[in-house]
Amino acid sequence: MFKKFLNNLLGNEDEPQKQQEQTQSAFSQPAAPHTDQDDDDDDDTSPIQDHHQYQFDPQTQHGTHYSKAAFDAAANQHYEGLLADQDEAPSENEKRNLKREAITQLYLQWNGHNYDQLVQFEMANSLELTGYATQGFNQVKEEGNPLYEPIHGISLYDYAGIAHAMTQGIPEATILKAMGIEKAVWEEVNLLWPERMKEDASFGIMTKYGEYFAIAGEHPKLANLKPAAATATGGNANLEKLKTDRYFYEELCGARTAAYEYGLDGAQWILEHFGINLSDFQAVAMDWMTAQNQQFNSNEIHHYMDYQLQKQKEYAERFAKEQGGNIADDVEF
Amino acid sequence: MFGLSGNNKEAGDPVPPEWTEQIRETRERWFAFLQKLEERVEELCQAAIPELKAMRSSTDAVYEANIGQVWSGIRGQINQVREKARQTEEQKIRPFYRRLDSTGIAYTTALQFSEACAERYRRFEVFCHNWQEQLEAATKQDHEALYQKILNEHEQLKHQFKCLQCGAPIYLEKIYFSTSYLQCPACRTQNTYEPSTLAKSLSWIARDLAEERTAHLLDAYNKDAARNPDLYRSYLRSMFDEWNRIVPDMAASNEKFYQRLLDDFNKSV
C-alpha cells in the first residue's frame, strides 16, 4: 500500500487525479455548515452575557467605571510590592513580567474576573505589556518612525499590495509597471523591507503588514489588475461566502490542511475546487483573525476550532480514500 | 492492628490466573500492534528517502514546492499512524489498566502492566521521530555545496558581462544576488545586470550557512547556558561576522538585526 501512496505523491499514477476530478462536485457544494443545536450551545455559554455588567473603552479596553490614571497608580503600587518580594535582582524581562502580572491581577479584580475581557485588554495593550504589537488594535504609529519610511518610494502598504498581487498570480512585470518601478528597484525593496521587519523588536512592521495585506486588494494602483483565471466556476461567490460565513472559512482551512497532509498542494486545491486564490484566502484569514482579536470569545474560538478539526478529518478521509487508504489502515489491535 | 493487612492491593495477593492471561495477552497484542505500525512506517520511509534525495539533488532551488509536498504527505502518513496508536492506547490500554486497578489486584501488577505498555509506546514515538528526522535530512539543502556552486559560477561569469551600448566588458567585482545597475567604465551607460537564479539564492542561504559554520559555538553555550551567558554573545557575534563575510552587502542591515537580537538576549539575563 505504501508504494501506491508514494506513487501518488510522486505523481507516478494518474488514477487518483481522475478520482479527484470525479468527486469535484461534492467538494464544490459543501454540506450544511452547522445545526440549530450548535447555535443554541453558543448562546448558552457566551461570555457576552457577562459583558453587560461593565462597559469598556473600545481603544484601551479599560472599564469605564474607573480612570486609567487611577488604574495605573494602583498597578504601579502592586508592582512595587511584587518587586520588593523578589529574592534576587530580576532581569529586564522578569521585571516586565512582574509588571504584567500586577496589571492583569488588578484588571481582573476591577473588571469582574472576566478572562476573555482580560485577553482582549492584553491584546489592546500588548505593546506596553509584552513589547509586541497585536493585529487589529491600531497600536502601530507609522508617522515619524524611520522604520516605516518608504524604501525607494515603496511604502509598507505598497509592499503588501505588490505581495498580494504576486500571490494572485499576476505577472511580476505587470505589477511593477503598474507601480511605476523597475525590477532592480523592486528586488532591492524586496530585500530591505524584510530586513526592516527583522530589525523591529516589537513586530510592529509585521503586524501592520498583515493589516495592509488584508486590504491590499483595494490598492489604487493594483486593484484593477486581473488575477490568474480561477479554474472553478463561482470563484467570486465562494470568495464572498468565505468573507461572511465563518463556517465556510473554517471548512476550507480544514480542507487545505488535510490536502497538505496527503501530499497535495493545499492552496492549489482550494483554487481548483473553489476558485479562491491563496492571496485572497490569506487576506480573508487576516480579517477573521482581526475580528476574533477585537471580539475575543474563548467559547467561540473553541467552537470554530472543533468545527475546523472535524472538517479536516472529513476531508482527510476523502483524500485517503482517493489515494487508496492510509498506510496502516489494515493494521488492527 | 490498624487494618492494613486487609489491603489486598498493598499486600500484593497472587493474581488470579484468568487475569494473568488477560494481562499477558493485552500486553502482547499492544506490542505486536505497535511493531506492525513501525514496520509500515519503516517501509514507507525506506522507499521515500531515496526519492526525496534524488529530488533534492536534482535542483539548486532553496525551496522546491514538489519536495515540500511529498515530504508533507509522508509526514501526514506518519502522523496518521501515530494517531492510530494514540487512539488505540486511549481506547484499549488505558481502560484495561483502569479495570485492573479497580478489581483489587495487586497494585504492583497493574503498575507493571501500565509501565511496560507506556515504555513500548515511548519507543514507538521515538522510532517515528527518528524516521521523521531522517526524512527531513533527506530533504535538506547542502548549503556548503550550493555556496561552492555560486562561487564557481561567479568565477566563470565575472569577466563575461558586456555593456549593452558599446560592448565593453563590465567586471563583476562581487556576487550580485539581486538585479542591479552597473555603469559601463567605457561609455558610462547604465546597464541592468540580472543575476542567475543560483546567485539570487545567496541571500537566502547566507544565514543558514553562517549558523551551520558557527553551530559549535551555540552548542558550547547550550551546555553551559546558566553559568556563562557570554558564550551566547560570543556565538552571536561570530555568526553575524560569518554572515557578513558571505554577503558583505547586507552587513549594514545585518548589524541592526544583530543589535536587536543582542538587546533581546541582554534583557533575558
Image: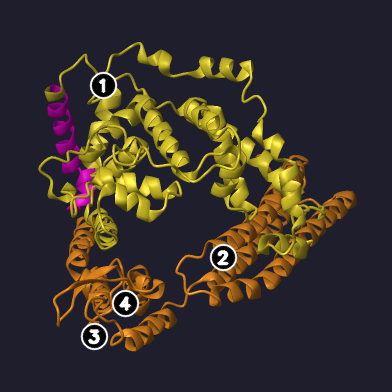
Chain colours: A yellow, B orange
Magenta segment main secondary structure: helix
Q: Position of residue A217 (x, y in %)?
A: 37, 37
**Disc marking residue B169:** 3
Between the C-alphas of marks 4 and 2, the distance is 31 Å
Point out the frontmost of discs 4 and 2.
Answer: 2
Residue depicted at x 56% and y 43%: A271
| Quadrant of residue A97 within the rendered picture | top left
Is residue A132 shown to the viewer in this render?
Answer: no
Residue B217's disc is 4
C-alpha distance separating marks 3 and 2: 40 Å
Label pair 3/1, CB-CB below 8 angstroms: no
At 23% across and 42% down in the image, what residue appears?
A: A98
Residues at marks 1 and 4, CA–CA distance in whole angstroms: 48 Å
Distance (Cα) linking label 3 and label 1: 64 Å
Say whether marks 1 and 4 touch (CB < 8 Å).
no
Residue at figure coordinates x 52%, y 27% from the top left = A241
Q: Amino acid at mark 3?
A: Pro
Query: Which amino acid type is marked by label 1?
Result: Pro
Neighbor class of circle 1 (other Cα within 10 Å; few <14, some 14-19, many 20+) is: few
* Secondary element at image label 1: loop
Disc 2 residue type? Answer: Ile
Q: Are marks 1 and 2 on the same chain?
A: no
Q: Amino acid at mark 4?
A: Leu
Classify residue A246 as left or right of residue B103.
left
Vertical side of A79 occupied by A333: above or below: below
Q: Which residues are magenta?
A: A70-96
Tell me if residue B252 comes above or below residue A190 in the rendering: below
Position of A149 compared to B175: left or right? left
In the displayed structure, B72 sits above or below A287; it is below
Residue indicated by mark 2: B67
